[in-house]
């Protein structure tokens, strides 16, 4: 089954504000595509595009880029953001894409495919991809790390406590690990030309508060916030205060290096 999540206005705004734009992975995808087909790329479809951070990164490489999402709130944020003229958005499910068969050069889903009806999505991606077109699915693990001077290990112990407190609220649809979901989808993809990659460490220097905001966009935190907003706020404040104490800073605007661990797979339709 596919799930409808992240549809609230506030959550969509948080996605736009805090989620990392993975331009390093876009470069990996395009390098892969350029080995498989001529460099004239017409149409890319970013499925489950959310507020469009990844969608707009595809714009320099394609004549046309379309981001699709089931959530009107997410798409409203995407449209409100500054977008290149060749990027547009459509509301639809991942399992029913409004594109002609065999007309798409790239189908990608960035930190979204784990919510899809996976087999139906793979069949739909195969339908819309042209021969030689590529499928690229990527996500990241929840165990982000922090680097700051000589206290990085201490910070990461605090982060692990934060993640452990959220684990009971993880949606059972996801199972114990998102990596396993993507490996299962990779194994289910019938294309002989495919490759699995784990893991790409993406580093960003960012205010500590932005790191906390990123964790608060996790579905597990959102579920806790709905069930017990006081406890959710307490957990965030506790993690923030412990991190600030270990860093010996007085403001959550102090900058820290966040390491996001991405995994992804690529496949070329024969």
Image (spheres, grey):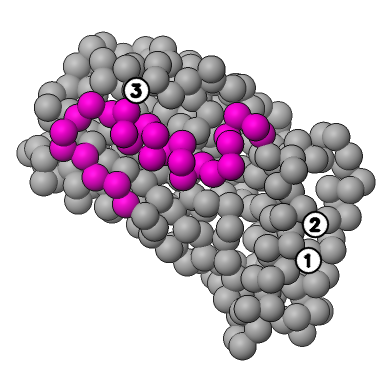
Q: Is residue 59 left or right of residue 74?
A: left
Which label belongs to residue 236? 2
Using the image, determine if residue 112 lies above or below residue 100: below
> Upstream in the sequence, badge 3 or badge 1?
3
Q: Is residue 80 left or right of residue 138?
A: right
| Cα distance between the residues tagged 3 and 1 | 40 Å
| Cα distance between the residues tagged 3 and 2 | 37 Å
> Upstream in the sequence, badge 3 or badge 2?
3
The total of numbered circles placed on residues is 3
| Cα distance between the residues tagged 2 and 1 | 6 Å
Q: Is residue 76 visible?
A: no
Q: Secondary structure at mark 2?
A: helix
Which label belongs to residue 104? none
Q: Give the residue pinned by disc 1.
A: 240
Using the image, determine if residue 85 lies above or below residue 263: above
The percent coordinates of residue 117 (x first, y second) are 47, 20
The percent coordinates of residue 67 (x first, y second) are 42, 29
Which is more foreground, mark 3 or mark 1?
A: 3
Residue 186 among magenta residues: yes
Q: Nearer the viewer, residue 235 or 77?
A: 235
Which is more foreground, mark 3 or mark 2?
A: 3
Question: Which region is colored magenta?
Answer: 171-197
Identify the residue at horizontal 82%, vertical 70% (top origin): 241
Q: Give the residue pinned by disc 3.
A: 122
Q: Decide: few, some or many residues near mark 1? Use Cα within 10 Å; few <14, some 14-19, many ≥20.
A: many
Q: Is residue 253 left or right of residue 41?
A: right
Identify the residue at horizontal 69%, vertical 71% (top origin): 157
The percent coordinates of residue 77 (x first, y second) are 59, 34
Q: Nearer the viewer, residue 186 or 49?
A: 186
Identify the residue at horizontal 64%, vertical 53% (top origin): 214
Q: Is residue 256 visible?
A: yes
């Amino acid at each position: 089954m596919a799930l409808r999540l992240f549809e609230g206005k506030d959550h969509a705004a948080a996605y736009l504000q805090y989620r990392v734009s993975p331009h390093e992975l876009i470069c990996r995808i395009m390098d892969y595509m350029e080995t498989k087909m001529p460099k004239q790329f017409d149409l890319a479809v970013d499925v489950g595009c959310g507020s469009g951070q990844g969608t707009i990164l595809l714009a320099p490489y394609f004549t046309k880029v379309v981001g699709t999402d089931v959530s009107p709130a997410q798409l409203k944020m995407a449209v409100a953001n500054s977008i290149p003229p060749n990027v547009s958005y459509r509301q639809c499910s991942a399992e029913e894409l409004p594109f002609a068969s065999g007309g798409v050069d790239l189908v990608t889903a960035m930190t979204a495919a784990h919510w899809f009806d996976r087999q139906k999505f793979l069949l739909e991606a195969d339908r819309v991809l042209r021969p030689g077109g590529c499928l690229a699915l990527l996500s990241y693990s929840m165990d982000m790390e922090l680097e700051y001077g000589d206290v990085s290990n201490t910070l990461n112990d605090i982060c692990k406590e934060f993640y452990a407190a959220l684990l009971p609220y993880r949606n059972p649809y996801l199972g114990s690990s998102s990596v396993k979901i993507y490996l299962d989808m990779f194994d289910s993809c019938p294309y002989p030309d495919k490759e699995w990659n784990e893991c790409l460490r993406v580093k960003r220097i960012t205010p500590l508060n932005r790191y906390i905001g990123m964790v608060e966009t996790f579905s597990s935190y959102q579920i806790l916030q709905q069930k017990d907003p006081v406890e959710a706020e307490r957990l965030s404040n506790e993690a923030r205060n412990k991190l600030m104490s270990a860093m010996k800073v007085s403001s959550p605007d102090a900058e820290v290096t966040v390491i996001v661990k991405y995994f992804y797979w690529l496949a070329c339709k024969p």
